Image: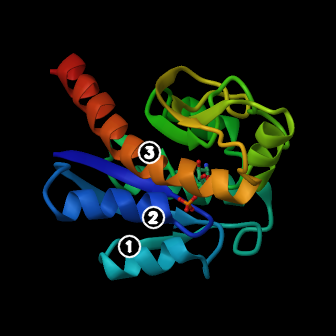
Amino acid sequence: MLKIGVMASGGGSNFKAILDRIDCGDFDAKCLFLITNNGNCGAVAHAKNFDVPVFHVSGKTHPERSAYESALLEVIDRFDIDLLVLAGYMKVLPTSFIKRLAGRILNIHPSLLPKYGGKGFYGIHVHEAVVAAGERESGATVHLVGEEIDSGRILAQCRVPVLENDTPETLAARVLEQEHQLYWKTIRDYGEGLKTISR
Ligand code: GRF
Protein backbone atom coordinates (compact mmCIF):
# COMPACT_ATOMS: atom_id res chain seq x y z
CA MET A 1 0.00 0.00 0.00
CA LEU A 2 1.29 3.43 -0.96
CA LYS A 3 1.35 5.95 1.87
CA ILE A 4 0.76 9.53 0.76
CA GLY A 5 0.41 12.95 2.33
CA VAL A 6 -1.39 15.76 0.50
CA MET A 7 -0.98 19.55 0.52
CA ALA A 8 -3.81 21.71 -0.81
CA SER A 9 -5.10 25.28 -0.53
CA GLY A 10 -8.30 25.42 -2.56
CA GLY A 11 -11.41 23.56 -3.65
CA GLY A 12 -9.59 20.25 -3.45
CA SER A 13 -11.31 18.51 -6.36
CA ASN A 14 -8.07 16.69 -7.26
CA PHE A 15 -7.66 15.68 -3.62
CA LYS A 16 -11.23 14.34 -3.57
CA ALA A 17 -10.69 12.45 -6.84
CA ILE A 18 -7.69 10.70 -5.23
CA LEU A 19 -9.63 9.90 -2.03
CA ASP A 20 -12.53 8.52 -4.10
CA ARG A 21 -10.20 6.16 -6.00
CA ILE A 22 -8.67 4.94 -2.75
CA ASP A 23 -12.13 4.53 -1.24
CA CYS A 24 -13.51 2.47 -4.13
CA GLY A 25 -10.46 0.20 -4.15
CA ASP A 26 -9.00 1.26 -7.54
CA PHE A 27 -5.94 2.74 -5.85
CA ASP A 28 -4.14 0.78 -3.12
CA ALA A 29 -3.06 3.74 -1.00
CA LYS A 30 -3.73 5.53 2.25
CA CYS A 31 -3.72 9.29 2.73
CA LEU A 32 -2.10 9.97 6.11
CA PHE A 33 -2.62 13.73 6.30
CA LEU A 34 -3.65 16.96 4.61
CA ILE A 35 -1.52 20.03 5.14
CA THR A 36 -3.27 23.26 4.20
CA ASN A 37 -2.46 26.94 4.44
CA ASN A 38 -6.17 27.77 4.28
CA GLY A 39 -8.21 26.33 7.12
CA ASN A 40 -11.56 27.06 5.42
CA CYS A 41 -10.89 25.58 2.01
CA GLY A 42 -12.84 22.83 0.27
CA ALA A 43 -9.92 20.42 0.64
CA VAL A 44 -10.35 20.55 4.44
CA ALA A 45 -14.02 19.59 4.10
CA HIS A 46 -13.04 16.61 1.92
CA ALA A 47 -10.38 15.55 4.44
CA LYS A 48 -12.97 15.61 7.22
CA ASN A 49 -15.40 13.50 5.17
CA PHE A 50 -12.71 10.88 4.66
CA ASP A 51 -11.27 11.04 8.20
CA VAL A 52 -7.92 12.39 7.03
CA PRO A 53 -6.09 14.40 9.74
CA VAL A 54 -5.71 18.08 8.83
CA PHE A 55 -2.74 20.30 9.73
CA HIS A 56 -3.19 24.03 9.22
CA VAL A 57 0.22 25.57 8.62
CA SER A 58 0.25 29.07 7.16
CA GLY A 59 1.61 32.58 7.45
CA LYS A 60 -1.21 33.17 9.96
CA THR A 61 -0.49 30.19 12.21
CA HIS A 62 3.29 30.60 11.79
CA PRO A 63 4.15 34.23 10.87
CA GLU A 64 7.91 33.61 10.82
CA ARG A 65 9.19 31.78 7.79
CA SER A 66 11.47 29.55 9.89
CA ALA A 67 8.57 28.52 12.15
CA TYR A 68 6.44 27.78 9.07
CA GLU A 69 9.23 25.58 7.67
CA SER A 70 9.73 23.72 10.96
CA ALA A 71 5.98 23.12 11.30
CA LEU A 72 5.87 21.56 7.82
CA LEU A 73 8.88 19.37 8.56
CA GLU A 74 7.34 18.29 11.86
CA VAL A 75 4.30 16.87 10.07
CA ILE A 76 6.45 15.14 7.45
CA ASP A 77 8.67 13.60 10.13
CA ARG A 78 5.72 12.40 12.17
CA PHE A 79 4.31 10.29 9.32
CA ASP A 80 6.13 7.74 7.23
CA ILE A 81 4.96 8.69 3.74
CA ASP A 82 6.19 7.35 0.41
CA LEU A 83 5.05 10.41 -1.56
CA LEU A 84 3.92 13.96 -0.92
CA VAL A 85 1.20 15.06 -3.33
CA LEU A 86 0.57 18.75 -4.06
CA ALA A 87 -3.03 19.23 -5.15
CA GLY A 88 -3.54 22.94 -5.72
CA TYR A 89 -1.13 24.08 -2.99
CA MET A 90 -0.69 27.79 -3.62
CA LYS A 91 2.40 28.56 -1.54
CA VAL A 92 5.95 28.08 -2.77
CA LEU A 93 7.59 25.35 -0.68
CA PRO A 94 10.82 26.07 1.21
CA THR A 95 13.93 24.76 -0.56
CA SER A 96 14.94 22.79 2.56
CA PHE A 97 11.66 20.96 2.37
CA ILE A 98 12.04 20.15 -1.35
CA LYS A 99 15.58 18.90 -0.74
CA ARG A 100 14.47 16.71 2.18
CA LEU A 101 11.88 14.97 0.00
CA ALA A 102 13.81 15.05 -3.28
CA GLY A 103 12.14 12.91 -5.95
CA ARG A 104 9.13 12.26 -3.73
CA ILE A 105 6.99 15.40 -4.19
CA LEU A 106 4.52 15.43 -7.07
CA ASN A 107 2.52 18.34 -8.45
CA ILE A 108 -0.17 18.76 -11.08
CA HIS A 109 -0.27 21.82 -13.32
CA PRO A 110 -3.09 22.73 -15.71
CA SER A 111 -1.04 23.17 -18.92
CA LEU A 112 1.30 21.23 -21.14
CA LEU A 113 4.51 22.17 -19.34
CA PRO A 114 6.99 23.63 -20.06
CA LYS A 115 4.44 25.87 -21.81
CA TYR A 116 2.45 28.20 -19.54
CA GLY A 117 4.36 27.37 -16.40
CA GLY A 118 6.40 29.43 -13.94
CA LYS A 119 5.73 32.69 -12.14
CA GLY A 120 2.23 34.10 -12.70
CA PHE A 121 0.88 30.97 -14.39
CA TYR A 122 -1.57 29.68 -11.84
CA GLY A 123 -5.33 29.14 -11.70
CA ILE A 124 -7.38 30.83 -14.39
CA HIS A 125 -4.35 32.85 -15.60
CA VAL A 126 -2.96 29.71 -17.25
CA HIS A 127 -6.11 29.19 -19.31
CA GLU A 128 -6.43 32.91 -20.12
CA ALA A 129 -2.94 32.83 -21.61
CA VAL A 130 -3.65 29.64 -23.58
CA VAL A 131 -6.89 31.03 -25.07
CA ALA A 132 -5.30 34.45 -25.79
CA ALA A 133 -2.43 32.77 -27.65
CA GLY A 134 -4.89 30.90 -29.88
CA GLU A 135 -3.49 27.49 -28.92
CA ARG A 136 -5.27 24.51 -30.49
CA GLU A 137 -4.57 22.25 -27.53
CA SER A 138 -3.82 22.43 -23.84
CA GLY A 139 -3.81 19.84 -21.09
CA ALA A 140 -2.32 18.96 -17.74
CA THR A 141 1.07 17.84 -16.50
CA VAL A 142 2.13 15.81 -13.47
CA HIS A 143 5.72 16.50 -12.54
CA LEU A 144 8.23 16.08 -9.75
CA VAL A 145 8.70 19.25 -7.75
CA GLY A 146 12.03 20.96 -8.36
CA GLU A 147 13.43 24.06 -6.73
CA GLU A 148 12.09 26.43 -9.43
CA ILE A 149 8.33 26.95 -9.84
CA ASP A 150 6.82 24.31 -12.18
CA SER A 151 10.21 22.74 -12.80
CA GLY A 152 11.12 19.10 -12.24
CA ARG A 153 10.89 15.93 -14.31
CA ILE A 154 7.63 15.49 -16.19
CA LEU A 155 5.97 12.18 -15.27
CA ALA A 156 2.78 12.31 -17.34
CA GLN A 157 0.67 14.62 -19.47
CA CYS A 158 -2.80 14.55 -20.95
CA ARG A 159 -3.99 16.63 -23.88
CA VAL A 160 -7.24 18.56 -24.14
CA PRO A 161 -8.32 20.29 -27.36
CA VAL A 162 -9.02 24.02 -27.19
CA LEU A 163 -12.40 24.55 -28.87
CA GLU A 164 -13.21 27.53 -31.04
CA ASN A 165 -15.71 29.03 -28.60
CA ASP A 166 -13.74 28.15 -25.44
CA THR A 167 -13.44 30.76 -22.71
CA PRO A 168 -10.72 30.40 -20.07
CA GLU A 169 -13.45 29.09 -17.74
CA THR A 170 -14.82 26.39 -20.07
CA LEU A 171 -11.31 25.25 -20.92
CA ALA A 172 -10.35 25.19 -17.21
CA ALA A 173 -13.33 22.96 -16.44
CA ARG A 174 -12.46 20.43 -19.17
CA VAL A 175 -8.78 20.35 -18.17
CA LEU A 176 -9.73 19.84 -14.50
CA GLU A 177 -11.91 16.84 -15.43
CA GLN A 178 -8.90 15.25 -17.11
CA GLU A 179 -6.65 16.07 -14.13
CA HIS A 180 -8.92 13.93 -11.97
CA GLN A 181 -8.19 10.93 -14.21
CA LEU A 182 -4.50 11.60 -14.70
CA TYR A 183 -3.30 12.39 -11.18
CA TRP A 184 -4.18 9.29 -9.16
CA LYS A 185 -2.93 6.95 -11.92
CA THR A 186 0.37 8.79 -12.15
CA ILE A 187 0.80 8.80 -8.36
CA ARG A 188 0.07 5.07 -8.32
CA ASP A 189 2.49 4.25 -11.18
CA TYR A 190 5.30 6.44 -9.88
CA GLY A 191 4.81 5.05 -6.36
CA GLU A 192 5.00 1.48 -7.63
CA GLY A 193 8.24 2.31 -9.42
CA LEU A 194 9.74 3.74 -6.23
CA LYS A 195 8.82 0.65 -4.24
CA THR A 196 10.42 -1.63 -6.83
CA ILE A 197 13.64 0.38 -6.70
CA SER A 198 13.83 0.28 -2.88
CA ARG A 199 13.12 -3.46 -2.62
C1 GRF B 1 -5.69 22.43 -10.52
O1 GRF B 1 -6.01 23.08 -11.71
C2 GRF B 1 -4.24 22.02 -10.50
O2 GRF B 1 -3.76 21.73 -11.77
C3 GRF B 1 -3.55 23.24 -9.95
O3 GRF B 1 -4.44 23.75 -8.99
C4 GRF B 1 -5.78 23.38 -9.32
C5 GRF B 1 -6.35 22.71 -8.11
O4 GRF B 1 -7.72 22.46 -8.26
N1 GRF B 1 -2.24 22.93 -9.41
P1 GRF B 1 -8.49 21.67 -7.13
O5 GRF B 1 -8.31 22.43 -5.83
O6 GRF B 1 -7.91 20.29 -7.05
O7 GRF B 1 -9.93 21.66 -7.57
Residue 65: x, y in percent?
A: 78, 55
Give the residue displayed 52% in from the left and 63% down from the top: 35
Give the residue displayed 59% in from the left and 23% down from the top: 152
Q: Mark 3 points at which residue?
A: 84
Instruction: Kindly tell me whether residue 91 is visible in this rendering.
Output: yes
Kindly identify the amino acid type of the residue bearing the numbered disc 1. Answer: Pro
Q: Is residue 110 left or right of residue 180?
A: right
Q: Mark 1 points at which residue?
A: 53
Kindly identify the amino acid type of the residue bearing the numbered disc 3. Answer: Leu
Q: Considering depth in this image, is 86 or 71 the residue closer to the camera?
A: 86
* Quadrant of image for the C terminus: top left
Residue 37: x, y in percent?
A: 65, 67
Asked if ligand 1 lies within 8 A of label 3, the reply is no
Mark 1 neighbour density, 10 Å: few (under 14) some (14–19) many (20 or more) = some
Kindly identify the amino acid type of the residue bearing the numbered disc 2. Answer: Leu
Q: Distance between the residues labelled 3 and 2?
A: 10 Å
Tell me, for residue 96, which label it has, or none.
none
Residues at badges 1 and 3 in contact (C-beta under 8 Å)? Answer: no
Instruction: Kindly tell me whether residue 33 is visible in this rendering.
Output: no
Give the residue displayed 62% in from the left and 27% down from the top: 146
Residues at badges 2 and 1 in contact (C-beta under 8 Å)? Answer: yes
| Sequence-wise first label, 1 or 3 | 1
Q: Toward which corner of the image does residue 191 lie, by quadrant?
A: top left
* Quadrant of image for the N terminus: top left
Tell me, for residue 34, which label it has, or none.
2
Mark 3 neighbour density, 10 Å: few (under 14) some (14–19) many (20 or more) = many
| Sequence-wise first label, 2 or 1 | 2
The secondary element bearing badge 1 is classed as: loop
Residue 186: x, y in percent?
A: 36, 35
| Sequence-wise first label, 3 or 2 | 2
Q: In this view, does 63 lie to the left or right of 155?
A: right
The secondary element bearing badge 2 is classed as: strand
